[in-house]
Amino acid sequence: MIIKIDDYSDIPIYMQIRDQIVMGISAGKLQEGEQLPTVRALANEMGINTMTVSKAYQLLKSEGYILTDRKKGARVRKKKDKSGLVSPENKKTLKRIVSESRLEGVSKEDLIKLIDEYY
Amino acid sequence: MIIKIDDYSDIPIYMQIRDQIVMGISAGKLQEGEQLPTVRALANEMGINTMTVSKAYQLLKSEGYILTDRKKGARVRKKKDKSGLVSPENKKTLKRIVSESRLEGVSKEDLIKLIDEYY
Amino acid sequence: MIIKIDDYSDIPIYMQIRDQIVMGISAGKLQEGEQLPTVRALANEMGINTMTVSKAYQLLKSEGYILTDRKKGARVRKKKDKSGLVSPENKKTLKRIVSESRLEGVSKEDLIKLIDEYY
Amino acid sequence: MIIKIDDYSDIPIYMQIRDQIVMGISAGKLQEGEQLPTVRALANEMGINTMTVSKAYQLLKSEGYILTDRKKGARVRKKKDKSGLVSPENKKTLKRIVSESRLEGVSKEDLIKLIDEYY
DNA sequence: GTGGTCTAGACCACG
DNA sequence: GTGGTCTAGACCACG
């Protein structure tokens, strides 16, 4: 899996890494149990500091997306305890996106199509 | 329209103001041509810095949501040239939200219901 | 509240800070809503790096113990959503402590007295 | 006695082995004088490095839990000179656990029940 | 070789 | 002035 950083984004690098790994897991590009690149390898490859990658991994760990093993590095975790709910933060953001899109003349159907495409 | 600020949110205050005004317009709470409170009045009412409100208004202006006039103050603008498209940024965010929700066990139908509710 | 770091402890500095703040809150030394020292102030006072203090604060934030406000810095948060449960990690540790103490000849009553004292 | 290792725990493997042997002794699963498997045998059985098991045994020896004999291997030691005291480290940890549990809404009685259960 | 921790120092947006 | 982010570089325990 290739991780692409947008240098001009307002989203911090460690968060961009985190987001892309989460999306990779959801899309099945990263299989359950699959090994992630080591902190050093990813930092090297991306030309960024190990601390930044480490921050992303620790966030993913605290969120339950990955597990870290002293020997084998980080692996994708089987997510248990699924809440079945959209987080309050995501709900707020979703509401904002719907509002903005509506004002741009996007139809409800088009938004649903996007959900359908991304799901 | 009442604007509520969460001091502890990660979203900057000026952006919270901007977001709520956009949602207010989309929801019809703020009608086209309707006058917004002056920067000073809103800042006073909310107990925040005028610079913060000013920043929100400038952003809204640059995005085409409002018009400012030296005499009449700020007014809701009739949005013309609607693109009919979801912005690239919003698409990315939507994709992230769908991914996270999916991994939390949220069904596609539940996400669509939210779109339906917010639209 | 004074935070004391044990340089010889195996527990990382940022975790010692975190632990002492949690205990301070529990003991009522830090009241709900009370302001914590700024990251820089605490780092200066303790003679350590701001990143280390920042790490402690971010952990406390992610655990729901504190809130950070752009203006006022960090404050003790009213903990909602109390689980009413001892965490699995703490249960394991408690079990280990009981086992070790038992082998040292500590009576059950003495352990209960400690609980009583610390609660 | 079976020793289970959690590869993803923050507790080092050698410490997990040590902890489980201590708890095994306390629970009577390992009797006084009973022989422990050789370092090599345990390492083989668990599929881990002999150095790791060796480290656990050396720690147990230094703590007075086991005795090692070139001929007979490692045996559970009769713990003499019991201090009758909870170690300072364990006291600190206990205090932290009580604080965290209290803030989670755990009652003192529930904590005492746990002590009762584990003792 | 692995992740984890820490420092010194810098720059940034927010307000 | 505040917290947040990032770098370059170092050292550490674990295995």
Image (cartoon, coloured by chain):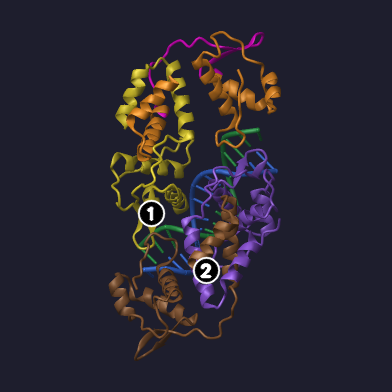
Chain colours: A yellow, B orange, C purple, D brown, E green, F blue
**Is C11 above or below relative to A65?**
below
Q: Is residue C52 visible?
A: no
Specify whether D25 is left or right of B16.
left
Circle on res. C97: 2
What SS does tag 2 mark? helix
Which is more toward the observer, A51 or A65? A65
**Residue at point 58%, 58% (across, down):** D109
**Which residue type carries mark 2?**
Ile
Residue B77 part of the magenta-drawn span = yes
- Please indicate, yes or no, whether residue A3 appears anywhere in the rendered image: yes
Cα separation between marks 2 and 1: 26 Å
Q: Are discs 2 and 1 less than 8 Å apart at CB?
A: no
> In which chain is the residue bearing label 1?
A
**In the picture, residue B114 is in which quadrant?**
top left
Q: Is residue D76 left or right of residue B71?
A: left
Closer to the camera in the image, C77 or C105: C105
Bounds of the magenta span? B61-89
